[in-house]
Image (spheres, helix red, strand yellow):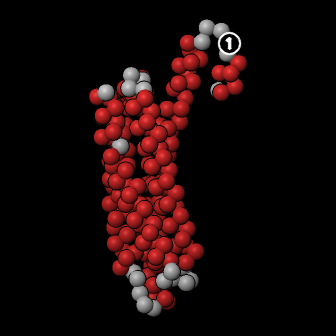
Amino acid sequence: MAEVLAVAGGIAAIVQLAACGKKLARALHRFSRDVVDARADVRRFENQVSIFCAVIEAAQQTIFRYCRENPESLLVTYINRSGVLDLINLEAGIVRRHLLDIRVQVLGMKSTFVFWASIKWGIKKSSFKEVVPEMESIKASLILLVSTTQLEPLCLRLNHASEPDQDLEREV
């Protein structure tokens, strides 16, 4: 049970990151109405942030559920002992701060003059999009953990199978 609690604490920053990303996506959506020339670009960035949030939330839930259902798992033990979630959380904290900063800047770019809002976006968009590779790194790390949670039970069943199991072979 202690292993599961450690994992639950380890994924807290991911939950906070997803919430922060959703707020940024909403701010980008509202801002996209103010920029005619850059609307497609703003919406694309909004979509990237929204997809990131959806994927990391799903990964967080999957990892937590797996750890809760398999507290004695070698994978759960490894996750806790290796500190991999702590490292992901460090990165999540950094990305969360970047997203908060971007949100504040996006909220400050609102203008009654559509042209001026578009110019502000053009000036800042490259610095905003610097966070995308960091987001992708966190997403990839979590997806790898989720994949591992899916593979561990299959590997265990294969290792413990005394005779070939056609259903199991089809799953693999």
Which quadrant of the view contains residue 36?
bottom right
Q: Is residue 25 visible?
A: yes
Identify which residue is drawn at 45% across, 49% down.
57
Is 85 on the left-hand or right-hand side of 50? left
> Mark 1 = which residue?
164
**Residue furthest to the bottom:** 113
Figure quadrant of the N terminus: top left
Identify which residue is drawn at 53% across, 19% down.
156
Tally of marks? 1
Q: Nearer the viewer, residue 13 or 121?
A: 13
Figure quadrant of the C terminus: top right
Image location (x, y in percent) of residue 159: 56, 14
Up the image or down, 22 lies above or below 142; here it is below
Up the image or down, 111 lies above or below 25; here it is below
Identify which residue is drawn at 44% across, 43% down.
61
Q: Amino acid at mark 1?
A: Pro
Up the image or down, 172 lies above or below 143; here it is above
Up the image or down, 34 lies above or below 124; here it is below
Q: Residues within 10 Å of mark 1 (few under 14, many from 20)?
A: few
Image location (x, y in percent) of residue 34: 48, 83
Image location (x, y in percent) of residue 96: 35, 58
Q: Is residue 91 visible?
A: no
**Residue furthest to the top:** 162
Identify which residue is drawn at 59% across, 17% down.
158
Image location (x, y in percent) of residue 147: 53, 36
Which quadrant of the view contains residue 103?
bottom left
Is 129 on the left-hand or right-hand side of 160? left
Q: Nearer the viewer, residue 118 or 34?
A: 34
User: Which secondary structure, mark 1?
Assistant: loop
